[in-house]
Image (tube, rainbow, N blue to C red):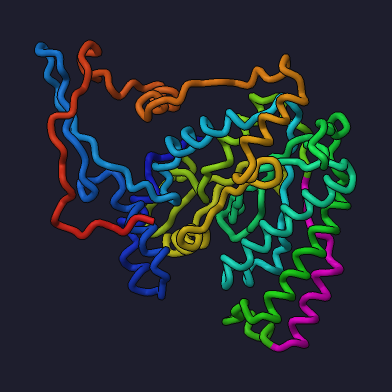
Amino acid sequence: MRGSGTEVADIFRQYGRDYIESHSMPRSHLRAMGAIEFCRTSLLGGHRDKCDNDECSHVRISYNSCRNRHCPKCQSLKKEKWIEARTDDLLPIQYFHVVFTIPSELNTVALRNPKVMYDLLFRSASETLLELSNDRLGAQIGFIGILHTWGQNLMHHPHVHCVVTGGGLSNDESHWVACRKNFFIPVRVMSALFRGKFLDYLKESYNSKELAFTGSISRLTAPFAFGQFLGKLYHKKWVVYCKPPFNGIGGVLQYLSRYTHRIAISNNRILKVEKGKVTFKWRDYADGDKEKIMPLDAAEFIRRFLLHVLPDRYVKIRHFGLLANRKRKHNIVLSRMFLGSNKTAIIKTEHKTWQELMLAVTGVDINKCPVCSKGRMVTIEILTRSSCHSPPEIS
């Protein structure tokens, strides 16, 4: 089932003003809404291009992107640039996909305290992987953690996807230690350690008064109520999922291209917007991964979308272990040496211009004249931002 061509920006234009007037909203939400609404419109300026073929002289106006990380239209190029930079870090080994999820009982606490709770999620997940790989493999692994906060139905569902090396450098950096073929670390072991770490750090945050408990969770301010809350979570089974290894380096790149710069909902999932309702398609993983249709009031759609606007300057993609920024280059060179020179033929590409990346992503050569297909489009005028509205703040 294909999308209707309607975009999140159209929903904001049609229903956003009423939503803003009836809700108290943080500035980060207002900025995201404004950026998405004004993206690729005259309000952000642009440029006028003309075909250099004298027999054609076609003129095209292109408007600037908002570059907001929550915008459905601004992620493809950013994603391709990021992935291109990561190809130099890939090793000729098996990689695993590990997902850490906090229980639904913590979702409201995370909504009230996003930065604290997301940091705890990253910290607990990363320490779990690093400690267990050290204990069971005697090695330092490397991995990329990617924060997602949504489920397919746009409800709040914080979890971290990790792309993990199937092995690592020995602790004395004298050789490479590989994990067993097609097997990383038992899920039940990761789950138990992750749960213990997260709840211990959550208790520390509570004791240091870093957490705010308002609205429906205000009762947790009381130490007794919070203690009971923790106790139930200690006895609950936490979900950690480990997928089989990727199908080679190409499989890792394909995965990264799907997950790194994904947002809560893409425009092609929106089926229609009419009579105050937004209808979109979603996959129900609890029901055999079936594709279903969900109609929501426009205000509820906007509310759910904004649940996933991250705190300002929050880093949602992080590198750990071998891939941590401080020693990444050194670790990669050393790992390749131990893995053998005949196995270091990693996918290499020359860094592309944004026009070349656009061609690779869309198959469209934006420099070629779309009318005559012979001439090249040359910029003849820079268009300033429209003065009829104030431009949005870009995060």
> Looking at the image, how many numbered discs can be counted on the residues?
0
Q: Is residue 224 magenta?
A: yes
Q: Position of residue 282 (x, y in %)?
A: 57, 46
Furthest-left residue in this view: 54
Is 82 in front, or is 383? 82
Q: Quadrant of residue 158?
A: bottom right
* In the displayed structure image, the side of residue 151 where residue 138 appears, left or right: right
Tell whether 360 sits left or right of 39. right
Prevailing secondary structure class for the magenta stretch in the rendered image = helix
Compared to residue 247, the image places residue 70 above or below, namely: below
**Residue 287 included in the magenta stretch of the image:** no
Q: Quadrant of the C terminus?
A: bottom left
Give the x, y percent position of residue 338: 77, 26
Relative image position of residue 121 (x, y in whole percent): 68, 59
Residue depicted at x 13% and y 34% = 381
Residue 343: image quadrant is top right
Q: Position of residue 147 (x, y in %)?
A: 60, 52
Q: Residue at x 25, y 20 (%)?
A: 370
Q: Which residues are magenta?
A: 222-241
Relative side of 225 to 116, left or right: right
Residue 216 in view (yes/no)? no
Question: Relative to 268, is 213 above or below?
Answer: below
